[in-house]
């Protein structure tokens, strides 16, 4: 959130560190990847889809980055998960500090930009939508971490976490990101399931409505956000009359339509990622897309549509599995009876992470860069490991790590 440099290097450092942990630390009783064979098979679909697409196009598309992106997703999640499974579950709570720090860095960044320009903050690390979405997710994780105790000073720790979450949410509002709000009700439902599971159905439903009302009130209090919502509605009406208008909503509709047409033309293997997508988009200049869109966009502003267009139906299935295969694991751990709260916290975080990316990706290419794919894979691996004892040890660690 502070720089666009170094993300790939850190990912490979994480892989090397994970391999070292696998070589040096003892395996848990049920194996490093015990119970995750189905997940591994689901993740492998993405790799198979990319290979099939490249083979169908005789490996001439030059989309090696697409293969690396899929490889990072699979290796990052499985190798890091296997390594983290060898650590003490109590130690796996502390990466949360990095998310809290990132929330403060991002909040200060967007606040300075917003105050300096008087308008929407445009960050260098991501576009405003991606930056705001990640900032919202960090705030949610910090809220859920109220179920973890990291220090001996529980009240002070809780207060710091609440202030951090408020700062992150404030930063998210400043980004004026409209699509991130689609995930807010989902995050609230997960939070209610985490904290109100013993309060009874009526209290849980009441807490959900109160949280939704508070979120709506905060959003409505931002005049800039209200104006962007109103602008979006106005732009949608204009798109019906002049579809090639270069406005935020019309550009998205143009890109989504172009990506869907690419998919329908080659539904089995797609057209190939990278240069083939750009060339195909430019070929629609003046017809399906405007000159500005044809010359300045090389993606579809949607993870599912871009994946379908570039790797076909198998790629689309692979992307859904990358979201929902781990999400299903987290959901089962969250709602299972008799699970210690610390493992349910990790499960709630993981479920929010997977569903958040799935929702964000509908209208934004969250997997635009390698580092975001790597970040998703490693973070999901961390939360799978942190919640693993919910299904095996029921809170009994297998030994301290060094």
Image (spheres, rainbow, N blue to C red):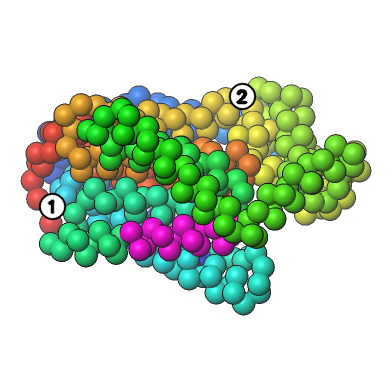
Name the spot of residue 138 as percent of width and height, x first: 41, 54
Sequence-earlier tag: 2 or 1: 2
Does residue 126 lie above or below 47 as drawn? Answer: below
As drawn, is 39 to the left or to the right of 240? left
Looking at the image, which residue sits at the far bottom? Answer: 116
Q: Which residue is mark 1?
A: 401
SS label for mark 2: helix
Residue 368 in percent (x, y) is at 59, 49
Which residue lies at the image location 36% right of the left edge and 39% below the top edge?
207
Number of marks: 2
Identify the residue at horizontal 66%, vertical 22% (top origin): 268
Image mark for residue 202: none
Is there any visible trace of residue 65 in the rendered image? no
Outermost residue, top side: 268
Residue found 24% across the figure and 27% down from its top: 336
- Can residue 212 be seen by looking at this rendering? yes
Q: Residues within 10 Å of mark 2 (few under 14, many from 20)?
A: many
* Quadrant placement of the C terminus: bottom left
Res 383 → quadrant = top left
Classify mark 1: residues with Cα within 10 Å, few (<14), some (14-19) or many (20+): few
The stretch in magenta equals 162-176
Q: Is residue 335 left or right of residue 309?
A: left
Residue in front for this viewpoint, 283 or 127:
127
Q: Residue at x 44, y 30 (%)?
A: 324
Q: Residue 387's spot in the image, x, y percent?
A: 25, 39
> Are the residues flagged by discs 2 and 1 in contact, CB closer than 8 Å?
no
Image coordinates for residue 233, horizontal then vertical, percent: 74, 44
Give the main secondary structure, helix, strand or loop, of the magenta stretch.
Answer: helix
> Which of the labelled discs sits on residue 313, or is there none?
2
Check the image and report above or below for 116 versus 249: below
Q: Nearer the viewer, residue 317 or 132?
A: 132
Q: Is residue 247 left or right of residue 345?
A: right
């Amino acid at each position: 959130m502070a720089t666009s440099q170094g993300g790939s290097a850190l990912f490979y450092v994480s892989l090397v560190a994970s391999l070292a942990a696998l070589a040096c630390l003892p395996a848990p009783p049920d194996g490093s990847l015990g119970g995750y064979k189905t997940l591994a098979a689901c993740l492998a679909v993405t790799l198979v889809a990319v290979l099939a697409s490249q083979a169908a196009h005789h490996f001439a598309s030059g989309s090696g980055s697409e293969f690396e992106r899929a490889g990072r997703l699979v290796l990052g999640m499985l190798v890091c998960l296997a390594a983290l499974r060898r650590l003490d579950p109590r130690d796996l709570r502390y990466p949360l500090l990095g998310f809290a720090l990132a929330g403060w860095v991002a909040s200060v960044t967007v606040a300075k930009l917003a105050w300096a320009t008087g308008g929407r903050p445009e960050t260098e690390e991501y576009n405003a939508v991606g930056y705001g979405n990640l900032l919202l997710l960090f705030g949610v994780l910090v809220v859920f971490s109220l179920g973890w105790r990291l220090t001996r000073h529980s009240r002070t720790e809780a207060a710091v976490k609440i202030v951090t979450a408020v700062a992150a949410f404030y930063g998210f509002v400043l980004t004026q990101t409209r699509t991130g709000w689609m995930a807010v009700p989902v995050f609230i439902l997960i939070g209610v399931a985490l904290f109100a599971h013993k309060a009874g159905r009526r209290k849980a439903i009441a807490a959900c409505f109160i949280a939704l009302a508070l979120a709506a009130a905060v959003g409505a209090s931002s005049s800039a956000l209200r104006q962007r919502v109103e602008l979006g509605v106005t732009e949608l009406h204009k798109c019906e009359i002049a579809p090639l208008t270069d406005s935020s909503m019309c550009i998205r509709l143009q890109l989504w339509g172009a990506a869907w047409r690419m998919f329908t033309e080659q539904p089995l293997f797609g057209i190939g990622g990278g240069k083939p997508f750009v060339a195909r988009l430019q070929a629609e200049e003046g017809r399906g897309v405007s000159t500005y869109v044809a010359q300045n966009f090389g993606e579809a502003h949607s993870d599912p549509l871009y994946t379908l267009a570039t790797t076909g139906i198998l790629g689309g299935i692979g992307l859904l599995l990358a979201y929902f295969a781990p999400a299903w694991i987290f959901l089962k751990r969250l709602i299972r009876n008799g699970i210690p709260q610390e493992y349910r916290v990790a499960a709630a975080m993981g479920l929010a992470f997977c569903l958040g990316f799935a929702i964000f990706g509908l209208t934004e290419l969250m997997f635009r860069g390698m580092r975001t794919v790597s970040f998703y894979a490693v973070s999901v691996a961390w939360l799978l490991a942190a919640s693993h004892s919910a299904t095996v040890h029921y809170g009994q660690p297998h030994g301290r790590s060094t």
